[in-house]
Image (cartoon, grey):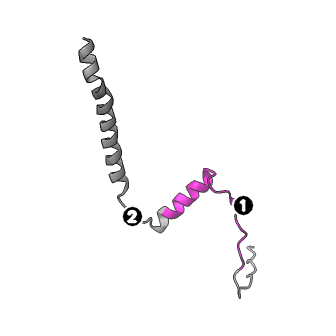
Amino acid sequence: MKKTISVYWPLAIVVPLVALAYLNIGSRANSRVPQTPLDANHLTAELARAVSYGMIDTSAALPAKPMRGTTAVPAAEAS
């Protein structure tokens, strides 16, 4: 029995390592598939989701620069 264990213990280590390497190579090949760019609707939805989850801090953003050559239009009063 000792001879059988001493002969096959390397296989107990090598076979799982080969299986893990095969799975790792397969997952890398799948991750190399290029993603298609998002259209405007999906992009703004993802941005809104990121802000709502707190991934983007709106208070730390740079202040918006005013546009040149524009004048403020007074709001019409409803009666």
Q: What residue sits 39% from the left and 61% below the top?
A: 35
Which quarter of the rendering shows the N terminus? top left
Residue 33 painted magenta: no
Percent x, y for residue 3?
24, 15
The residue carrying pointer 1 sits among few (fewer than 14), some (14 to 19) or many (20 or more) residues within 10 Å by Cα, namely few
Q: Which residues are magenta?
A: 43-66
Q: Is residue 53 left or right of residue 18?
A: right
The residue nearer to you, when weighing 25 against 59, is 25
Residue 58: percent from left, percent from top:
68, 60
In x, y percent, where is residue 46?
52, 58
Residue holding disc 1: 60
Q: The residue under label 2 is which amino acid type?
A: Thr
Q: Name which residue lies at 30% across and 38% down.
A: 18
State the image coordinates of residue 75 (x, y, percent, origin top left).
74, 77
Answer with the quarter of the image where residue 72 lies.
Answer: bottom right
Residue at x 60%, y 50% (from the top left corner): 53
Q: Are marks 1 and 2 in contact (CB under 8 Å)?
A: no
